[in-house]
Amino acid sequence: MKYLLRPDKSRWHKHDSMKKSAYAFVPYQTNFGELCGMADDVVYPGKGFGMHPHENMEISTIVISGSQAHKDDTGSEGVVSCNSVQTMSAGTGIMHSEFNASETESFHSFQIWVYPKIKNVKPRHEKFSYEPEDKLNKILLTLSPDGRNGTAVINQDSFFSVSKLISGNSVEYKMNMAENGVYIHCATGKVKIDEHELNAGDALGAYEGEAVTISATSDADLIFVEVPMQRGINV
């Protein structure tokens, strides 16, 4: 297994009156395989993004705390909570807005961009919901290209998973497809992967291997983004 260590300090940090953000990649400029965007956002009460366009991108949202209100020009609207993952195929083009659903509390989310397998598809949304115990000391698959195990569908040979590890526990991540790599982000807490120790905000890309073991040295929330690696790595 080969590794790409991405410590928190390697991300681009930005803080303004609306939110506090850290960006691991810049779409169309940097990438880990087909993964080209990972925005770690803490959005303040009542703040958010008005209607704005996207096209030909798979954009998924994982909420760590709080909830996000979403609306788009297909007529879709709803709320993404900390026990759900939303994915959007922008395809031929979509206009949407995203706001903190609360007027009193911030929300913490990750917006993750993956290049599409097929371009110019009809824009669509899908949400996968789960119970907190479904990811406790285990890896829970939430998005897949074929909707396996009731997961939401993403237009790429990509697999998104989440895990909540209690200190002292370990899990093994196995690649779902040969030649894929997985980008493991430590959202909270501390974990160890081989000789690498990750704190909150750190990430590790693993590729050219079949499996990797993650051990929690404190309670930790983890995000796994498995993607094809044919595009290579550019950071």
Image: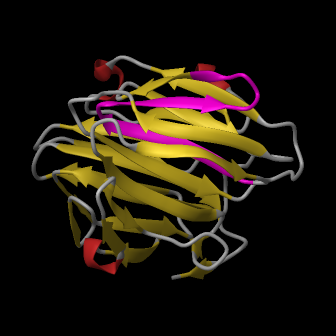
Q: Nearer the viewer, residue 42 or 154?
A: 42
Locate residue 163, reporting x and y percent: 33, 38
Q: Position of residue 51 (x, y in %)?
A: 62, 43
Is residue 5 visible to us here?
A: yes
Q: Is residue 60 magenta?
A: yes
Point out residue 179 in the picture as x, y percentages from the top left corner: 66, 63
Residue 77 higher or lower than 223, as above or below: above
| x 64%, y 39%: residue | 96
Residue 176 is left or right of residue 223, and the answer is: right
Residue 81, by quadrant, is: top left
Q: Is residue 158 visible?
A: no
Q: Residue at x 64, y 56 (%)?
A: 114
User: Magenta residues, as a range?
Assistant: 57-77
Looking at the image, residue 45 sits to the left or right of residue 168; the answer is: right
Color scheme of the displayed model: secondary structure
- Quadrant of residue 229 within the rendered picture: bottom right
* Residue sitting nearer the eye, 10 or 194: 10
Asked if residue 176 lies left or right of residue 16, the reply is right
Decide whether residue 139 is among the magenta residues: no
Task: Point out the residue furthest to the bottom here.
Answer: 234
From this view, report whether residue 5 is shown above or below residue 108.
below
Q: Observer-nearest residue: 105 or 140?
A: 105
